[in-house]
Image (cartoon, grey):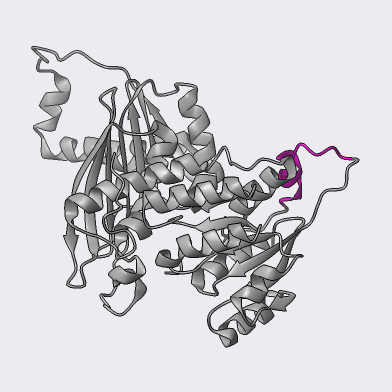
Amino acid sequence: MNLLTLGIVIDITNESKSRSTVTSGEKMKNYNWGILGAGSIAWEFTKGLKLVPRSNTYSVYSRTYEKALKFSDLLGFEKTSMTFEAFLDDPDLDIVYIATPNNLHYEHAIQCLEAGKHVLIEKPIALCAWQAQEIEKTANENQCLCMEAMWSRFMPLYLEIKNLLQENVIGEIKYFSASFGEAMMYEPKTRIYNLKAGGGCLLDLGVYPISLALMLLGEPESVSGSCRKSESGVDTLDSFSLHYKNGAIADLQCSFDCKLPNNTWISGTNGSIDIPNPIYRPNRYRISKYHPYKIQSNPGYGTRDKLHEISFFSNMLHAIGNYMADPFRKFKQTKWVNFTANGYQYEALEFMKNLDRGELQSDIMPLSDSIAVLKITDQLRRDWGIDYPETKNKTEHL
């Protein structure tokens, strides 16, 4: 699914420099990026990568050589490998972005890490938690940086929201809601409807709201939910909740069957944050402040009530509130947080920042969070009776 919309391209050189600890007098390393897989997500990532200083679009490998060659020519790569072995054996290749189908992420990540390559893995990092744990183990053994490319996590707006919540701007969080759903044509032969290829909306779309909930609220105490399945056996409409020790609830949905609001709402004890769609790449939010109020036993009967009994005045009062005052209030409360182009460059910037510093884990997207997301999806799939062939009898639970 192509989710790219046009954005305004701005210079991100200063941002890149500000995110690094390397001194101005020290020469910073250029990194050769290799792209594994030449599908639509690889195209979008590479468009973002081309905006990142010190990143070289170096090599490409795909199971279909002609597809890789077209990808390489149009996007300006230096090399196109004929075999996966040749791709990995290249000593000049620094980083591999894995953009293959979901069911191949685990296998390809292990092979890249064992070859000594740093890897950025498109979400989901794997099909289940035990696969992600094995990826983490292999990364540690080979002293390689490994990170999940969870697009939304790196967007400037969510990083700003995380800081605001840490400052307790809306009090203690009690409720979080988020959805991601698009109306998809049912075609059993396509990857997203194929159980053997790791299909289903939970791993393709549901991981977005789950990952955001973990980023902003932490790991839940328990999880519950329900789903609708297609004839091919994958989940196509999911509704589930994460329950926290402090009583907070994260109410999440994802869907292939129909379009959902695709927004995010965070409500605390004295305020709320409304993040309009799209959930994966938002550019604005609104903070509303409030205080708990006492229920009045006798609200009274005043002039306003009498005016509302007259249709003309009632309609006028509603119009003033709904069509004039409310939009003006929302306009004043809206904070815009712009981003560059399609936003994929932010995950590449974070990855290279960690390499510059010699760090093998990202603070924004640590592997512990990637594993925690898959523990949640494991539990839900277990409850729903959905098993991928590669994960059968090895499902992790909360």
Name the spot of residue 142 as percent of width and height, x first.
63, 50
Magenta stretch encompasses residue 22: yes
In depth, the one of 10 and 189 nearer the eye is 189
Name the spot of residue 252 as percent of width and height, x first.
28, 45
Magenta stretch encompasses residue 300: no
Name the spot of residue 295 as percent of width and height, x first.
15, 15
Instruction: Specify the segment rendered in magenta.
Output: 12-24
79 left or right, relative to 252: right
When the figure is inspected, residue 279 is found, relative to residue 165, above or below; the finding is: below
Query: Which image quadrant for residue 64?
Result: bottom right
- Tally the marks: 0
- At a point 38% along the width and 45% down the height, the residue shown is 373
- At a point 72% along the width and 69% down the height, the residue shown is 90
Q: Quadrant of the N terminus?
A: bottom left
When the figure is inspected, residue 6 is found, relative to residue 220, above or below; the finding is: below
Asked if residue 275 shows in the view, the reply is no
- At a point 36% along the width and 53% down the height, the residue shown is 128
- At a point 70% along the width and 46% down the height, the residue shown is 355
In depth, the one of 143 and 79 nearer the eye is 143
208 left or right, relative to 77: left
> Farthest residue in the right direction?
25
Q: Quadrant of the C terminus?
A: top left
Asked if residue 377 shows in the view, the reply is yes
Name the spot of residue 330 as percent of width and height, x first.
40, 38
